[in-house]
């Protein structure tokens, strides 16, 4: 009788780990996509919106690399009482020009609040003024 000859099992190629393309995808592309998505969400969806009234007392373009329009609105409840200062940012140059022309005048500003903006390149405050209306004076004044 002949003895069956056993053939050695075929060797599988050694597994070397994830390919470079997969590694680049997980280390670079996915975090970048998450960051872009986060920026999109915090800049497009607002936490709150509303209006505030007062005197525009300060407005300037600030920043070393990222120039932003920053302002201050003095809101007073009763004449003779120290005003409450409200800091705001403006992203639109057209609105910034309207705010600049309203310095020292009684205004009503419409704003949106965006919480969680991770850098001051979009504005130093979470409050972004979208429009401004110059009024003749404070109510009752």
Image (cartoon, helix red, strand yellow):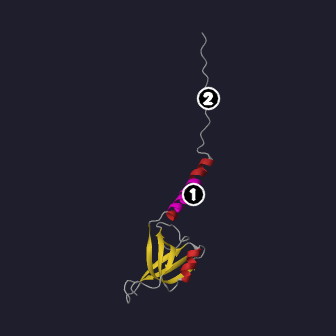
Instruction: State the image coordinates of residue 110 (x, y, percent, origin top left).
Output: 47, 73
Residue 89 spot, x, y in % from top left: 51, 75
- Residue drawn at x 59%, y 40% is 15
User: Is residue 74 positioned above or below 114 on the image?
Assistant: below
Q: Which residue in the rendered view is the most extreme toward the top?
A: 1
Q: Secondary structure at mark 2?
A: loop
Q: Which residue is mark 1?
A: 32
Q: Position of residue 44 (x, y in %)?
A: 51, 63
Locate the C terminus and report the quarter of the image it occupies: bottom left
Mark 1 or 2 closer to N-term?
2
**SS at mark 1?**
helix
Q: Does the magenta run of residues contain 39?
A: yes
The local crowd at label 1, few if under 14, some if 14 to 19, many if 20 or more residues have their Cα within 10 Å, is few
Q: In the rendered view of the protein, which quadrant contains the N terminus?
A: top right
Query: Which residue corresponds to the image point at 61% horizontal and 45% vertical from the top-left?
Result: 19
| Residue 12 at x, y percent in the picture | 61, 33
Residue positioned 48% across, 76% down in the render: 109
The stretch drawn in magenta includes residue 117: no
Asked whether the beta carbons under mark 1 and mark 2 sit within 8 Å of each other, the answer is no
| C-alpha gap between disc 1 and disc 2 | 43 Å
Residue furthest to the bottom in view is 80
10 Å crowding of disc 2: few (<14), some (14-19), many (20+): few
Give the magenta part as a residue range.
28-41
Task: Please state which of the two labelled residues, at mark 1 or mark 2, is closer to the viewer.
Answer: 1
Q: Is residue 130 above or below residue 73?
A: above
Which residue occupies the foreground of this view, 111 or 1? 111
Which numbered disc covers residue 140?
none
Residue 88 visible in the snapshot: yes
Residue at label 2? Answer: 10
Residue 139 picture quarter: bottom left
State whether the magenta stretch is mostly helix, strand or loop: helix
């Amino acid at each position: 009788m002949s003895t069956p000859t056993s053939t050695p099992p075929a060797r599988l190629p050694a597994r070397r780990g994830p390919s470079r393309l997969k590694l680049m995808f997980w280390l670079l592309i996915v975090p970048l996509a998450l960051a872009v998505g986060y920026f999109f969400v915090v800049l497009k969806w607002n936490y709150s919106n509303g209006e505030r009234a007062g005197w525009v007392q300060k407005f300037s373009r600030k920043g070393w690399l990222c120039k932003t329009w920053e302002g201050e609105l003095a809101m007073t409840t009763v004449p003779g009482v120290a005003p409450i200062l409200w800091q705001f940012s403006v992203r639109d140059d057209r609105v910034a020009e309207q705010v600049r022309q309203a310095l020292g005048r009684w205004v009503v500003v419409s704003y949106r609040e965006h919480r969680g903006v991770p850098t001051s390149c979009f504005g130093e405050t979470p409050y972004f003024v979208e429009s401004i209306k110059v009024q003749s004076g404070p109510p009752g004044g």
